[in-house]
Image (cartoon, rainbow, N blue to C red):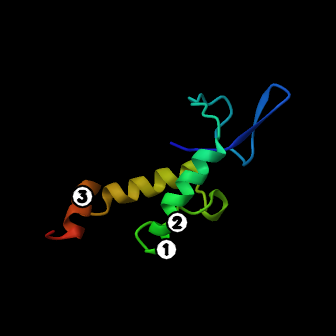
């Protein structure tokens, strides 16, 4: 699920960042008004956690390289056939004994 910020202008919700949907793709939206009070409260809680190294913020949308649908399918296929095992088993084995 993605979260984007939009601005409401002249009766239209306009995204502030480019969207990566294919033409005609249906999406479901949840509209939440942005509250400065809520943002301030979140920042107050997150700041000490970030400074303590307990929380790291996700990269900004533009900092993460995107891949095409074809690249995604190719990656998925290579992961499925890499060892003949489901990815979940590979991850569990990689974790070792906890």
Quadrant in the rendering for residue 55: bottom left
Q: Residues within 10 Å of mark 3 (few under 14, many from 20)?
A: few
Q: CA distance from mark 3 to mark 2?
A: 44 Å
Q: Dot 2 lies on which element?
A: helix
Q: How many marks?
A: 3
| Whether residue 75 is situated above or below residue 33 in the rendered picture | below
Q: Dot 3 lies on which element?
A: loop
Name the N-terminal-most of marks 3 and 2.
Answer: 2
* Residue closer to the observer: 61 or 66: 61
Question: What x and y, as percent, mark residue 78?
Answer: 39, 59
Instruction: Please give the name of the residue rendered at 53% of the width and 53% of the height, measured from the top-left corner.
Output: 42
Which residue extends farthest bottom? 52
Q: Are marks 1 and 3 in contact (CB under 8 Å)?
A: no
Residue ID for mark 1? 51
Which residue extends farthest right? 10
Q: CA distance from mark 1 to mark 3?
A: 42 Å
Question: What x and y, as percent, mark residue 59?
Answer: 57, 63
Question: What x and y, as percent, mark residue 57?
Answer: 52, 63
Q: Dot 1 lies on which element?
A: helix
Name the N-terminal-most of marks 1 and 3.
Answer: 1
Residue ID for mark 2? 47
> Can you tell which of label 1 and label 3 is closer to the viewer?
1
Which residue extends farthest top? 11
Mark number, residue 95: none
> Can you tell which of label 3 and label 2 is closer to the viewer?
2
Question: What x and y, as percent, mark residue 1?
Answer: 50, 42
Residue ID for mark 3? 84
């Amino acid at each position: 699920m993605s979260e984007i910020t939009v601005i409401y202008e002249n009766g239209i919700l306009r995204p502030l960042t480019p969207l990566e949907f294919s033409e005609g793709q249906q999406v479901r939206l949840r509209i939440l008004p942005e509250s400065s009070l809520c943002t301030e409260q979140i920042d107050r809680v997150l700041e000490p956690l970030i400074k303590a190294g307990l929380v790291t913020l996700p990269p900004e949308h533009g900092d993460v390289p995107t891949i095409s649908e074809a690249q995604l399918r190719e990656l998925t296929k290579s992961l499925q056939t890499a060892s003949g095992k489901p990815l979940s088993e590979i991850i569990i084995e990689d974790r070792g004994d906890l």
